[in-house]
Image: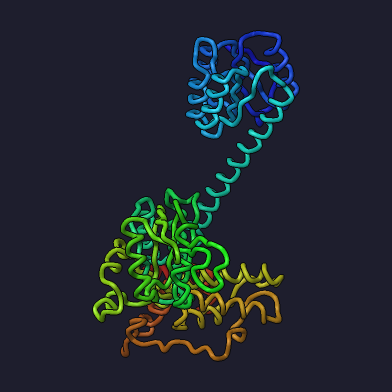
Amino acid sequence: MPSEAKNGHAEQQARILLVLPESTEAKELVAYLNGMNVSAMWAHDGESGYEVLDAEAVDALICPVRAPRTDGLRLQLLGRQRNPQMCGIVLADPSAEEISLATEAVRAGAYDYQVRPLNPAKIGAVLERGLSYQRLVGEVSDLQQRLDDRYRFGGVARRSSLWQRIYHQIEQVAQSRASVLIVGETGTGKGEVAKAIHQRSRRRDQPFVEVNCGALPEGIVESELFGHEKGAFTGATTSRKGRFELADRGTLFLDEVGDLPPATQVKLLRVIQNGEFERVGGTHTQRVDVRLIAATNRDLQEMVAEGRYRADLYYRLHVVTIQVPPLRDCREDIPLLVDEFVRQFARENGKIITGVDARALDALLSYEWPGNVRELKNWIEGMVVMCSHDGLLRDEDIPKYVESRPVSDSDTGFKVGMTMAEVEKLALRETLKAVDYDRRRAAEILKIGLSTLYRKEKEFGLRQGA
């Protein structure tokens, strides 16, 4: 069984397993490891090393490609099964056969190999680099997990039932290879949904490439998507990869896909079907593996009926369709979005702005938002930048051209002939719903005390979801 080469190691110390027969060379390496800030174990043969790896994970494994009583490559494989980020260092004799085995081990996932006679200082340097890389990978993974926990689906943070349904759709489709068509008005957050799908997919560590098809002149759309060869047109002084090649093994997001010209639609259909295309001016067939997500604010089905969009391309694009609602249909999200944007722009502009007051929020809740979330975000940025006071943004900070939506009977449920108690109950219920049952904010809007709000809520039998 292995013996501890260093006693009293700290909890954060990396655990190193050395598998090497007892010899002067091995003792020198053990002595060197004892001088490093690691916890080292020494197994004198492969069978003892196997027992250690079978029982626990180690941060690094140093062993010969041919360990006595057990194959060294098998030890490396077992170690990576216990810890995929393990730093594996294999030791080889200078023979061509052993160097070939060591190279094979590196291709299979080992970090490095060293040729005898062993140089402890060199092995120590390789070990430090490998462990540093391992820590970096762990930190990135931990950060990604914390970001996912804090900002579910890549920053898309909503509470409305419509957006909860979208979250569920994202979870369902993310792990598949199916093409996704995201439809909705301009500024609703279609791009955020596309990024969320990629972030939750198996391709999350591969490129996410996006292109706005509507922003590209018709003459360069194909070059942007599929690339071009040198001399393909005037100004093409070098060959250039297109977005499909850049997104290989990852995700390509085509925004405003309804604006693609007919010729490009034909070429896009071919890529979706078999992953093949030629660069502009080229004859060599390129092959890519790309997950395609498209978005549009147009009615593609109507365009197909009018002959302005290829039906076969439309059917390929909308294997799965996600409908993103306009902001006016999920007003309960507005207070959350306002708070998020105020914090963001106050921080960016060095302002001490903590939120919006009740009258300002009421105006924001009443507006129709034809530009959706993008318009709200731009508004809040302008209000924060132009605000000349600290604290809460006020009603007078809202641009004067803004007109609130008229409130109709169908909007609120108000009807002529209602008693004052019924009107009071209706006002309380609708205000609570508008602020997602933030009772402190509802009390501010209604200009009543928080205790009064609780009393009225109990009196009228109101509760969240009622």
Residue at horizontal 59 percent and vertical 13 percent from the top: 43
Splitting the image into 4 quarters, where does residue 134 fall? top right
Question: Total number of numbered labels?
Answer: 0
Residue at horizontal 66 percent and vertical 37 percent from the top: 132
Residue 356: where, in percent of width, then height? Answer: 59, 76
Q: Is residue 134 above or below residue 266?
A: above
Residue 162: where, in percent of width, then height? Answer: 37, 67
> The C terminus lies in which quarter of the figure?
bottom left
Residue at horizontal 64 percent and vertical 8 percent from the top: 22
Q: Nearer the viewer, residue 187 or 269?
A: 269
Residue 224: where, in percent of width, then height? Answer: 48, 67
Q: Is residue 269 above or below residue 426?
A: above
Splitting the image into 4 quarters, where does residue 185 fall? bottom left
* Horizontal side of residue 366 vs 177, given as left or right: right
Q: Nearer the viewer, residue 115 or 381?
A: 115
Residue 392: where, in percent of width, then height? Answer: 63, 76
Q: Is residue 404 above or below residue 165?
A: below
Residue at horizontal 44 percent and vertical 82 percent from the top: 370
